[in-house]
Amino acid sequence: MSVEAREARQPWILLSPALSAVALLLFVPLLFIVVYSFWLRTSTGADQVGFYLDNWQEALTDAFYRDILLNTLKIAGITTLVCAVMGYPSAYFIARSRGNKAMLLLLLMLPFWISYIIRTMSWINILGVSGALNSLLLSIGLIGEPIQMLYNEVTVILGLVHFLLPFMVLNIFVSLDGIDTTLEDAATSLGATRWQAFLQVTLPLSLPGLAAGGLLCFVLGAGTYITPLVLGGPTDAMFANLVFEAIITQLNWPLGSALSLMLLAVLAVLVGIYNRYLGMAQLMKGLG
Amino acid sequence: MTGLGWHLIRGYAILVYLFMFLPVAVVVLLSFNASQFGSFPMTGFSFRWFVELANNDAILRAFRTSIILGLLTALISTTLGVLASLALVRYRVPGANLVSTLLIAPILVPEVVLAVALLLFLNFLGINKSFTLLLFGHVIFTLPFVILVVQARLVAIRRDVEEAAMSLGASPIQTFFQITLPLMLPAVLAGALFAFTISFDDITGTLFWKPGGVETVPTQIFAMLRNSISPEINALGTVMIVMTVGLPLLGAAIARTLSKKSGL
């Protein structure tokens, strides 16, 4: 073998373990559940191999699934919006601060490292019947009886925002930090007010970061089932809860496959639109 | 920058920081509560919940499972990830963008979907819910993070040091082990730490993959939440916070010392 041929082969030797892992543990399984979603789970619990449209018909036409899918998109949308509203000024503060930026960013990213389940359940300590907020309101005499503030849609969104905000801040920060601050100065020296300079120069330049953060928050938010289980009530199930129910509780794996693929398809459309207009590079910047 | 606007932004940012930290602080505070209910009012300062924790067999078992799983995940994921990152950073790979996207794919797919696909496929192949399935799941889920972190750090290593070693007569393998690997060590450690932390914290996939009776720390906490929030959970939360925040900080410190020693 020539030297060039050996050189050309080397990277593929290095890449092959990781690529095989992704192929065997992600892509082939995904193709497998596509096939599986056309099988039938019979009443005996055995799978009937074949090409049945029953699962898809159920998943696509049952109003129950459609409502929960819409509700999931709504919750993910509100969560993303709240993250943007809370995250943008914070990211702006960090990026334009004269203090130790790295430290400020690290501090806000710290909760990212704290266990997701702990952060989620920590809200029970705050909002529960015997939580901090109720104790406070009782002790100052504002209420006579503890109020149940937990286990509704608002607390699900609250938990999701608490979980996802660091992703948003990081992405906005990365793009704000890359903007030359002299641009804003130039705008003001040409007669724009600070606010105009921000709206017309800085904000448009930081939109890619905002979009990347928004996409991450939306996709991660729409795929969660733990937060609704811990902080939601019986009627606050999200779409991933249905998947969990079908697979783990009802053991109807073909139906679970169809539901998983539905969720994947909806989110893939969003990622596709994002990729079409902004490209994946921005997303990688925020993740690295 | 000064002025009223800036003060408003700063005040707003402080509120956001409080929002992020207050609930966590309350967990830590309540874990030292002497009262037998995991709630307010605080009745005194006590370590009793940490003592109970240390005597709780189920929790200790969960810790053992999580740590073994995390270490094995980190080992496999980092090995695969470092090799792939080397290829992507050091060679001109045709279709490098596509390869990168394929390798990152496991975090672009919602974790629930990944969990379902892996569970059903491996079950079809005869691998039931087991530690093996958990390990496979955690490896594929952490691999993209390792690749992103390692790649970012690898770019910073200068190639001419290696070329100097080779021109002085070192073989490629000698060069790798004596020059490249020591220089890469901070990146490798950072990747491994990332993989361990993500594996240790994972619950979304783990609930699908774990066999009955086996619990990791997050699934154990989740199971305990079904009853009510006990002070023990807060104590466990405090331990987790110390671990998940302390470990990366420790790792960053080690990486800094190592990279200082290697003169970069």
Image (cartoon, coloured by chain):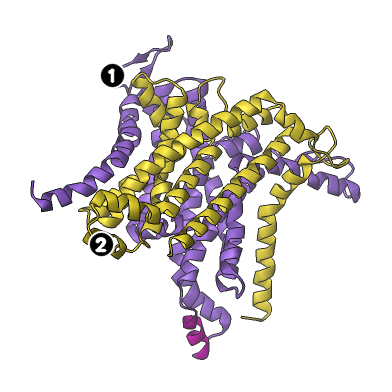
Chain colours: A purple, B yellow
Residue furthest to the left in view is A2
- Which quadrant of the figure has residue A131? top right
Q: Is residue A155 in view?
A: yes
Tag 1, which chain?
A
Q: Does B173 lie within the magenta span?
A: no
Q: Which residues are magenta?
A: A182-189
Distance of mark 2 from mark 1, alpha carbons? Answer: 59 Å
The residue under the point 14% across, 48% down is A6
CB atoms of marks 2 and 1 within 8 Å: no
Q: Nearer the viewer, residue A87 or A52?
A: A87
Residue A220 % position (x, y): 49, 46
Q: Nearer the viewer, mark 2 or mark 1?
A: 2
Q: Is residue B208 above or below residue A283?
A: above
**Looking at numbered disc 1 in the image, what kind of residue is underneath it?**
Gly
Residue visible at 48% across and 30% down?
A243
- Looking at the image, the residue that sits furthest to the bottom is A190
- Provide the secondary structure element on which disc 1 rests: loop
Determine whether, in the image, residue B36 is placed left or right of residue A251: right
Up-down relation of residue A212 to residue A226 (above or below): below
Look at the numbered disc 2 and give the secondary structure of its residue.
Answer: helix
* Residue picked out by circle 2: B163
Count of residue discs = 2
Residue under pointer 1 = A50
Q: Name the residue at 53% across, 86% down.
A: A188
Q: Residue at x 69, y 48 (%)?
A: B24
Query: Which image quarter holds the N terminus of chain B?
Result: bottom right
Read off the chain for label 2. Answer: B
